[in-house]
Image (tube, coloured by chain):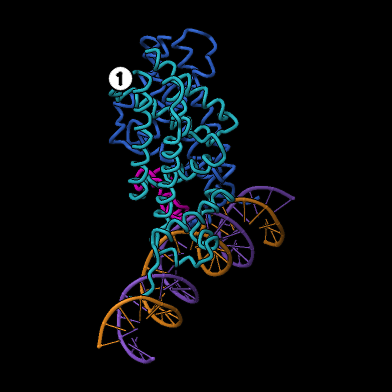
Chain colours: A blue, B cyan, C purple, D orange
Amino acid sequence: MPKIVDHDARRAELARAMWRVVYRDGVGAATVRSIAAEAGWSPSALRHYFATQTELLVFAMEHVQAEAAERIAADDRTGSPREVAQRVLEHLLPLDRQRVREAEVWLLLAARAQTDPAARARMAEADDGIRRAAEFAVCLLTGEPAPDPDVAAGLHALLDGLALHALLHPERMPPARARALLGAHLDTLAAS
Amino acid sequence: MPKIVDHDARRAELARAMWRVVYRDGVGAATVRSIAAEAGWSPSALRHYFATQTELLVFAMEHVQAEAAERIAADDRTGSPREVAQRVLEHLLPLDRQRVREAEVWLLLAARAQTDPAARARMAEADDGIRRAAEFAVCLLTGEPAPDPDVAAGLHALLDGLALHALLHPERMPPARARALLGAHLDTLAAS
DNA sequence: GGCCCGTGCCCAAGATCGTCGACCACGACG
DNA sequence: CGTCGTGGTCGACGATCTTGGGCACGGGCC
């Protein structure tokens, strides 16, 4: 058979090129052509590994989720359950430049999910991940083995709302304020 | 001088055409061409009234905000402060088909605000409107004349998060559930 | 009443985008 | 050593937003 390249490795390489573009020029500059140029190839070459631009965004979104999961897994879980819960959830907020860029991809994919089924499916999985983190935090706070679904859903909505505000209005919702508001919500959950 | 047309009336007419397209085909179909065709004109004619597509979206967003403000103003304010607060805030959630369409425009403009200054400015104003509603609700619940900024900001973030979930995952966040989660949050605010 | 010129509008083109088809090159297998 | 399938490029297509040039109309002025 012909020459064989490692598709997964190539996709990862292309994804790295995409993130370089996103970090440097913002998510709006992440076009097929600019990513191909960044990687040093022709735009058509990308089609062998990502059939559509949405597939690229989906792959980038998987990277975002993997990064978040790794940050959470790397947490040492020291301190009170309340402190652990807050730290875990803060890993999901765009509190530094890198995570702002990641959240930009998240928001772009959210808008695209309104019309693109593939984007919608990926957003649903990312949503699951955040929901599980919220449920984990609720379990930590209440001491119960199973979280109240409504309490977790409310925390989940607050998280996404804080992320949205931190992204769109960073001057009104700086990282410290997002952290404080999250902490206040966790306090009320712990109290009840 | 030459023939004079009422620019405001023409803009309103174009905005109505846009909303017909959005209601029928979704926000993804709201291109300059489709809107011009819906209004019966050429795409270039739109440029006299909306220089860019973002201006169209901004005008549509102003309509969304005006509709929401009107819904809130039309509320008869009967019932307990707790009930009034919930009803007012529910006017800001995408609980029916029309408001889902309006929220689609909101999300599209949010994504565009990442790169487009005009969209960003309009989103900031829309954000102000929601924040004021949240502050009003907090005042109702606490009985204080001035709301706690952090409490209002938390409620605001929850509102936007609920709206986002109702929009992206309506099967997980149906209108009844969004209402219930909002109500639960208001209960905890009233209790503290 | 007739001319002017500015507004309104269309046509065509430019720029950029995502996507696709046709074609070429290389290299592993038979 | 030949074959053919994979990898890659080039060019083109269609759609999009945007822009410039030009035509038509009609209100104001002489």
Left or right of B171? Residue B60 is left
Residue B17 among those drawn in magenta: no
Res. B104 in view: yes
Residue A3 appears at what percent x and percent y? 59, 50
Q: Quadrant of residue B123?
A: top left
Residue D5 appears at what percent x and percent y? 67, 52
* Residue position marked by numbered label 1 in the rendering: B144
Does residue A34 sit above or below B181 in this rendering? below
For the image shown, how many numbered marks are present on the structure?
1
Left or right of B2? Residue A52 is right
C27 or A18: nearer the viewer:
A18
B187 or D16: nearer the viewer:
B187
- Span colored in magenta: A18-41
Residue sitting at x 28%, y 36%: A171
Residue A189 appears at what percent x and percent y? 42, 14
Q: Quadrant of the C terminus of chain A?
A: top left
Residue A39 among those drawn in magenta: yes
Residue sitting at x 41%, y 25%: A71
Residue sitting at x 43%, y 44%: B111
Q: Would you say the magenta stretch is mainly helix, strand or loop?
A: helix
At label 1, the amino acid type is Glu
Does residue D15 sit above or below B180 in this rendering? below
